[in-house]
Every structure is written in structure tokens, then in C-alpha cells.
Amino acid sequence: MLTIVRSGAALGAEVRGVDLRALDEEAFAAIRRAWLDHQVLLIRGQLLSDDDLIRFSRRFGDLDAAPIQENGRRFVEGHPEIYVVSNVIENGVAIGSLGSGEAMWHTDMSYLADPPKASVLYAIEVPARGGDTGFCTMYGAWDALPGSLQRRIEGLRVKHDGTYNSGGYVREGVTPTNDPRTSPGALHPLVYTHPETGRRGLYLGRRRNAYVEGLPLEESDALLNEIWAFATAATLTWCHHWEVGDLVLWDNRCTMHRRDAFDADSRRVMHRTQIKSDTRSGIHRPCEHEV
Ligand code: SIN
């Protein structure tokens, strides 16, 4: 029987009693509701092929093509929707992205004008230690800001950098620059209303090369540093230690995530899908409510 067990942290819940290969409409609706309520869901013990992963992900909406990996490779043969996160090298070529180092806090693909609404990450091989993935709630981040800071940032937009990925690698085809005013990327409102839950949250993307539109660079950095300190407080996070067969689904509009480093000699292989936003979503809409 399907049950939802809260993580006990600021976000996150585990869904128990399901086989994602054989979900009826009622069970899917319960998972979808839990995903909106808890922002991140863990579903353990799955036995998914790439086709199963794609089929489950598609129930949430159309899938984005996977971003090109930093080494120029694109995707799993025959499955352009799957992004490989891995440190494994085969025949001298990395089979995936992000290596074995720390991946800094980020929201997936926020350097695009219309980033995915959700990501699904499935564990195929995991190290015994390290490589844990942490999540933080961007609703909680907004709520944690003092009123004066909320009022100050209302209506501001942030440039989300498209130069570096969260592992610090330069994206394929991009000339590296550390000036966020001229780097490739997309502008998004800093404060948004989630289009499905109606809750307000921050939309920060990545810290590196982020820039508050219209401010002198130093002022932008100081403001972003102040906001990021609130947003990534330990009280707003939940961390997951992976086992093979774990699937984690997150709402990319109201969370950020990061990953711990792990032993480079161990193997970690994860397959990820990205679900397109339904519309040009709440992230892009101006805020509707006064603080
Ligand atoms: C990601 O940033 O999508 C990957 C996170 C992870 O490797 O755990």
C-alpha cells in the first residue's frame, strides 16, 4: 500500500509501497500531490530500465533534451532525454558529468529562459561513502528573510550564468568568463509565485557568476551573499544517502540541491531526466502579491 512518510526536515518525504513500472492513476495522483507538498520525494528499491525511467518521468509532462556534458558527449545512446551524472571513465572518456567532486548548490538548467519544472535522478551505481545529495527549500528561504530584505528584493531579476555547471566545469561550447554581466545566461525574477501551489519562494539558480540586474557588481555580490546565507541554512535542508535503486524526484521551481564529493576511485552512475515547464511558468511571471 502506498504511504508517504515525511523526512522530518524542512522538505522531503519518502513514498513507500510502489513499483514505478506499474503505477495506476490513483497512485500516480498521490505521488504528484506529495511531490507538490514536500518538494522532494525519495522512492527506494526500484528496478528501472532507461525506458521505465522515461515512461515514469513523462507522466509529469514532456521531457527536455539532456544538456550536453562538459566533454561534449550528449546522452545515452537512443535516449536523448537522459543526462548521465557519473565519475566513471570508459576507454579514456567520461561517461557522464560532474566527476567526483562537490557539486555546489544549484537549480537545474536555470541558465535557460525556460528551465525544467522537475528532475528525476535514479541511482544505478553508488559509492559506499560520500556522494550524498542535499536539498533546500526555496519557500523556506523566502520565509526566512527579514521583512526589510523581502521588500528590498521584490521585483529584482537575477542573471543566471550559463558558463559553468555545478561541478565547476565549463559548459560545452562556452568561452569562460567570470564577468556575470557579459556571460551567457538568462534573467529570472528573484522572487516568484509557484504556479501550482501558489506559494512564494526565491529563485537563485547558482551563486557563481550570478548577478542582480542593474546593480553595481559589488552591490550585487553583497546582496546575493546575504540572501544565499539565509537560503542555505542547515535548518532548510534535507540530505539523502543513496542506495542502488533509489529514485529521487524534485520540484526544480522551489528547491536547490548540492552533492558531496566522493572517492574518485569508486563508481557512481546516476541517470537523470528533466521535465519541461508546462507554460512559461511562475518563475518568469512578475510577482503577484505585495509582501
Ligand atoms: C545533479 O545536480 O543533478 C546531480 C546531483 C547528484 O549527483 O547527486
Image: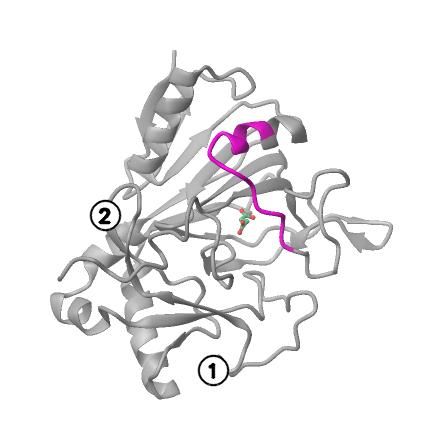
Q: Residue at x 36, y 56 (%)?
A: 283
Horizontal and vertical percent position of residue 217: 39, 86
Relative to 23, say whether 234 is above or below.
below
Horizontal and vertical percent position of residue 291: 13, 62
Horizontal and vertical percent position of residue 255: 37, 50
Horizontal and vertical percent position of residue 267: 69, 43
Q: Residue at x 70, y 69 (%)?
A: 173
Residue situated in front as seen by the camera: 165 or 91: 165
Label 2 Cα crowd, 10 Å radius (few <14 / some 14-19 / many 20+): few
Residue situated in front as seen by the camera: 44 or 35: 35
Relative to 121, say whether 156 is above or below.
below
Residue 4 belongs to the span the image colors magenta: no
The amino acid type of the residue labelled 1 equals: Arg
Instruction: Name the residue tied to disc 1.
Output: 181
Does label 2 or label 1 sit earlier along the sequence? 1
Residue 59 belongs to the span the image colors magenta: yes
Q: Residue furthest front?
A: 279
Tell me the magenta residue range: 55-67
Label 1 Cα crowd, 10 Å radius (few <14 / some 14-19 / many 20+): some
Instruction: Name the residue tied to disc 2.
Output: 199
The quarter of the rendered structure image containing the N terminus is top left
Residue 29 lies in what quarter of the image? top left
Residue situated in front as seen by the camera: 64 or 126: 64
The amino acid type of the residue labelled 2 equals: Arg
Please, what secondary structure does the residue beneath circle 2 have? loop
Real-space Cα separation, disc 2 to disc 1, in angstroms: 30 Å
